[in-house]
Image (spheres, rainbow, N blue to C red):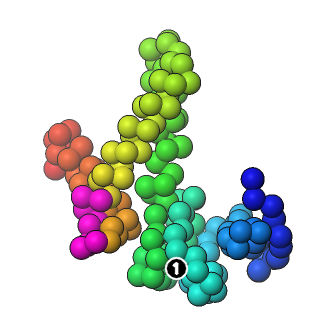
Amino acid sequence: MNKISDIRVLSGYRILVNFETGEDRICDITPFLSKGDFKELVKNGCFIVAETSNMGCNAEAAEYLNENITFAPGKAVNAGGVAVSGLEMSQNSMRYNWTREEVDNRLHMIMGNIHETCKHYGQQGARINYLRGANVGGFIKVAEAMLAQGVV
C-alpha cells in the first residue's frame, strides 16, 4: 500500500493526493473537472485518466485528455457498475444466486468485450482512442437494438 505524502485542496471539493511513489491522483466529488484541472497533472507526468463518473469531465477537458494522454471515458469505465446491477437483476428474476466467482467471471467477460469494442472502433495506428471507440461502439449498439425492435 502506498503512503500518502501530501494532500491539497485544489478548488472547491477537488483534492489532489500525492503518493510517496510520486503518483498524483485527483479525488473529486464535484460534477465536472475542467481542462485546467488536468493540465498540471499531465505536465507532471500523468499518463492515464479513467473517468469514474458519467460525464465527470466537461467536453473541453475530455478533448484535452484524449489528445494528450490515454483517456478512458465514463461510459466505458462505469459500465462495470451498470453490468453488476444487470447481473443482480438477472439473478433476482431467475431466483438464483451466482457465486462470487461466477459474477466476477461474467463481469470480466463484459468489461473485456467493452475494451475490445473500444479498441475496434477507436484504434488509430498504435494508439487506442477510447473516447471515439466508446462513442461509436455505444451508438452502434443502440442503433442495432433499435433496428432489431423495428423502431427504425
Q: Position of residue 73 (x, y in %)?
A: 46, 64
Asked if residue 7 lies left or right of residue 53, the reply is right
Q: Position of residue 8 (x, y in %)?
A: 82, 76
Q: Quadrant of residue 33?
A: bottom right
The one nearer the camera, 90 or 127, is: 127
The one nearer the camera, 112 or 95, is: 112
Asked if residue 143 lies left or right of residue 30, the reply is left
Asked if residue 30 can be seen in this view, the reply is no
Q: Is residue 43 above or below residue 1?
A: below
Q: Amino acid at mark 1?
A: Ala
**x 49%, y 28%: residue:** 103
Q: Residue furthest top?
A: 95
Q: Position of residue 127 (x, y in %)?
A: 32, 71
Asked if residue 2 can be seen in this view, the reply is yes
Report the magenta residues as a range.
119-126
Q: Which residue is mark 1?
A: 61
**x 83%, y 73%: residue:** 6
